[in-house]
């Protein structure tokens, strides 16, 4: 069992499938990403640069795609509580997995372009 598995298992049974689904979306759309724990939460990097992070809290899932990832999808994210590089998806509502997929793909392309410079 790796660190991410341990992280997910530390949450209630109703939250674990959400975290596993987010992890799956990230890994399917960024298969080359390095998976680790950073800032106490699952973190993904490409080209040694941050890609996205996620974390579970009592009432929401925090998703962190750096300010550029949130800026690019600001209209779709506007219905959720946000910070500069974060968004909160309420646990008691449908998690927008398709939106997470689009954000991850955007961030992969962004990181790959920066790496080529």
Image (tube, helix red, strand yellow):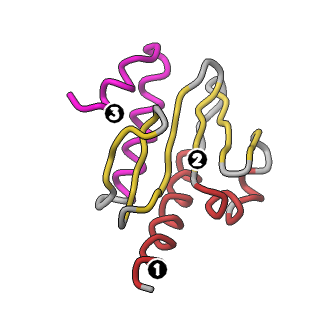
Residue 26, above or below 61: below
Is residue 9 a member of the stretch shown in magenta? yes
Secondary element under disc 2, as helix, strand or loop, is: strand
Residue 11, above or below 45: above
Does the magenta stretch mainly form a helix, a strand or a loop? helix
Pointer 3 or 1: first along the chain: 3
Pointer 2 or 3: first along the chain: 3
- The residues bearing labels 1 and 2 have C-alpha atoms spaced at a distance of 20 Å
Q: Residue at x 30, y 31 (%)?
A: 3
Secondary element under disc 3, as helix, strand or loop, is: helix
Is residue 48 a member of the stretch shown in magenta? no
Q: Which residue is mark 3?
A: 4
Return the residue found at the far left: 1
Pointer 1 or 2: first along the chain: 2
At which x and y percent is residue 57? 59, 23
- The residues bearing labels 2 and 3 have C-alpha atoms spaced at a distance of 16 Å
Left/right placement of residue 42 relative to residue 77 reads left
Q: Which residue is mark 2?
A: 64
Q: Which residue is mark 1?
A: 113
Circle 3 crowding by C-alpha within 10 Å: few under 14, some 14–19, many from 20: some
Q: Residue at x 51, y 64 (%)?
A: 107
Q: Residue at x 67, y 57 (%)?
A: 70
């Amino acid at each position: 069992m790796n660190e991410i598995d341990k992280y997910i298992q530390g949450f209630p049974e109703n939250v674990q499938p959400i975290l596993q689904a987010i992890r799956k979306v990230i890994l399917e759309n960024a298969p080359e990403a390095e998976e680790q724990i950073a800032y106490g939460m699952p973190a993904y990097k490409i080209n040694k640069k941050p890609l996205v992070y996620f974390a579970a809290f009592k009432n929401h899932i925090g998703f962190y795609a750096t300010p550029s990832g949130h800026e690019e999808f600001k209209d779709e994210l506007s219905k959720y509580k946000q910070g500069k590089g974060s968004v909160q998806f309420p646990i008691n509502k449908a998690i927008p997995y398709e939106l997470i997929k689009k954000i991850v793909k955007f961030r992969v392309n962004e990181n790959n372009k920066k790496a080529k410079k």
